[in-house]
Amino acid sequence: MDRTRIALMLWLATLSATQMCADDGGVSRNSGLEDAAKPAVAIQFANKLEPAAEDAADARPIVLTFSAPWCGWCRKLTGTTFADPAVAELGKQFRWVKVDPDDEPVLAAKYKVHGLPHTLVLDAQQRVLASRPGYIPPEQFVKFLDDAVANKEPMAALQDDYLDRLTNSASEDWEQTVAQAIERMGQSSQEERRAIVAALQEAGAASYPVLVDVLEDERLAVRAAAGQTLARLSEAGLPFDPFADADVRRAQVTAWRAWLAE
């Protein structure tokens, strides 16, 4: 069999395979696999806050997420959390907006966005009901939304109250209040961060165990805030690198726990 005949037979085989794909609806098996690998996004987002916020007839809270194509954790938030059935079930209770801070720098500055992703829940007047930086797993995201809906007052209105509660280490929910304050420091103004540290300083060493626990938080901004606060309040002089590998951080936290036990 000469080369010309072999080439002709190969061409006919290729043509036949192509026809089979066309007869099967025009979708190749490979493209089907690629489509199956792509996550189905359960939530449909607007890309501007203004149209959603200006709809006076719609009183639903607004979920505002700052995200960017280059951000790996943003892609994970979209591919897992926003595609999760439990999150999708809550979808109609909110208006959803996703913004690239490079396109909306003024809006990002207004809501004190310093890293991506960053998600906020706003009331109808665009006041912050809840704010959280970083990737949020589906189960935690559902709780984040539920807590935001339960919060009837904007965060700014709660500032004086929670600062008072931070100083009262005898209160029943004080440890939770401290942990929430550290979470909040990641998106607070410099003035508010100073106020939180001052309140914890007034509470004394009782806050140290809570802060050490928060050093193990999976969110970079939160564990960094805990480490910085410990460095300011305590005299331990121990290192903590929020950027370090997990094994290094665990060893550092162990050293902090040993110091607490002394």
Image (cartoon, rainbow, N blue to C red):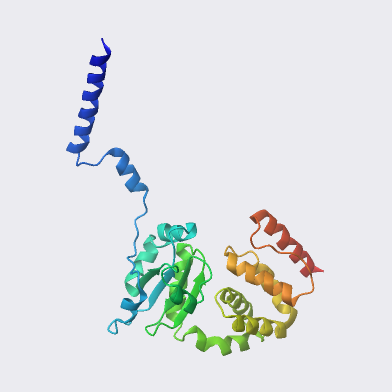
Rendered position, 199 above or below 37: below
Q: Nearer the viewer, residue 68 or 232?
A: 68
Q: Position of residue 109 (x, y in %)?
A: 49, 76
Q: Is residue 63 left or right of residue 234?
A: left
Q: Position of residue 138 (x, y in %)?
A: 45, 63
Determine which quarter of the picture holds residue 4. top left
Residue at left offset 72%, top offset 61%: 252
Q: Position of residue 46 (x, y in %)?
A: 33, 69
Determine which quarter of the picture holds residue 192. bottom right
Q: Position of residue 88 (x, y in %)?
A: 35, 65
Whether residue 261 appears in this view of the structure is yes
Determine which quarter of the picture holds residue 199. bottom right
Q: Is residue 238 left or right of residue 224?
A: right
Quarter that holds the C terminus: bottom right
Residue at left offset 59%, top offset 68%: 221
Q: Is residue 34 left or right of residue 258?
A: left
- Name the outermost residue toward the top: 1
Q: Is residue 17 left or right of residue 208?
A: left
Q: Nearer the viewer, residue 133 or 162?
A: 133
